[in-house]
Amino acid sequence: MDPNNPNRESRSTPQYALYQRENFWKSNDGQVPPFNTDPAQLEQLAKSKLTQNGWYYASSNAGQSHTHTANRQAFYRHRIIPRMLVDTNQRDTSTTIFGHRVPAPIGFAPIGINKIYHPLGELPVARAASSLNLPYCLSTAGSQPIEDVGKANDESAGSEGGVRFFQLYMPHDDELTTSLLKRAVESGFSACILTLDTWQLGWRHDDVNTSNYAFYHGTGADLGLSDPVFQKRLKEHGIDPKTQPNEAGALWIDNVWHGRAHTWEKVRWVQGLWKEISGGKPFCLKGIQSVNDAKRAVDELGVDGIVVSNHAGRQVDGAIASLDALEKIVDAVGDKTTIMFDSGVRNASDVFKALALGAKFVFVGRLWVWGLSIMGEVGVMHVMKSLLADFDILLNVAGYKNVGEIDRGALESGPKDYPLLPVTANL
Ligand code: GLV
């Protein structure tokens, strides 16, 4: 790609495609690109860098991974129809999410316990996200204090600060929930995304078989340990986190993934709480897969957004593909709320397909976890810059000028089909 291409001057979003050139050129300067971003190779490289427990947790899915496989199969059945001779010289990858203009419809999905992937946990990820001006979502199961993640996310951002959302796993302790949400608001998190599909973790064979629950082994409870209400709970239980890290971690995570379901009434309560604390900032539900639930979320609660997600296949095994759910949910409520998507995204064409089916925004998870595991912040940057370049190039070669042009007419879709295939992550 010609770096002096005159379209540079007229583009409002970064020339992400130039990252391809930067890497093509590298060997002339005696350099090599950081690593191969082909998802299958990324995954294998991450595996070679992680401890067994880190690897199992990153890769685990519910049961036999059939939901994960379905997620990937669903992408495969939709095919992009390229258009030729479209003037894509001034293409624009940007979009708007909850009033924030962002340079691409791509964000960092909330993923907990990043310390099992990197000693600094969530901090390098939050920094990488704002370096790229992409929204970052912090998980309640994160392994750094909310305040530190907020600061890290602002460090690499422009003067307006990073765009960040807080993903809530709602405890059955209202005082604790209130404290977490207050901390999030005070730390600049501008939307609350309540996850509904994980009152407890799904049955994941490898993790169970290796007692792989970091919090019970003294790692990853920092978000809780830094909370004043949780500190009070520790005292009430007579637990000293310094001498009893396993017990402290257990008390924390047993409040987060408690196994006791919440109901629609409780969601109404927490929505009101968030609105009050945040002064009306967006409140979203994550984990919706059924049209009925989506309708209820919109009609009864009037939520600002829905993340159509099946937790990347980590919760209910043998479930429908999240991409198949997306299509129906968009048809039912897509004009009434902001529909976002995650689960199974591995490259730019997956992002494109989710947008074509009606998602307004797409979160990626495992891709950045692998990058983090391989090379920390540099690894996250490489993975995400590659994804952005891939997306920018895809618009160029497929003949799309901007994100708004991507609709169902961009796809030819085969029938739904879930043949039982060997479980490979990247089909
Ligand atoms: C937590 O969100 C998990 O999937 O392990």
Image (cartoon, helix red, strand yellow):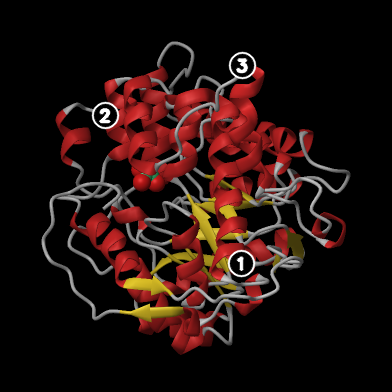
Q: Which residue is mark 1?
A: 283
Give the spatial CA distance, label 2 vs label 3: 42 Å
Q: Earlier in the sequence, mark 2 or mark 3?
A: 3
Q: Disc number at residue 212?
A: 2
Q: Residues within 10 Å of mark 2 (few under 14, many from 20)?
A: some
Give the spatial CA distance, label 2 vs label 1: 32 Å
Q: Is mark 3 within 8 Å of ligand 1?
A: no
Name the amino acid, label 3.
Gly
* Residue situated in front as seen by the camera: 70 or 295: 70
Q: Residue at x 72, y 65 (%)?
A: 92
Residue 226 in view of the camera: no
Q: Which residue is mark 3?
A: 30
Q: Residue at x 49, y 62 (%)?
A: 351
* Residue situated in front as seen by the camera: 17 or 284: 17
Q: Earlier in the sequence, mark 3 or mark 1?
A: 3
Give the spatial CA distance, label 3 vs label 1: 49 Å
Q: Are marks 2 and 3 in contact (CB under 8 Å)?
A: no
Name the amino acid, label 1.
Phe
**In this rendering, position of residue 339 left or right of residue 131:** left
Q: Position of residue 270 (x, y in %)?
A: 56, 64
Element type at marker 3? loop
Q: Position of residue 155 (x, y in %)?
A: 78, 33
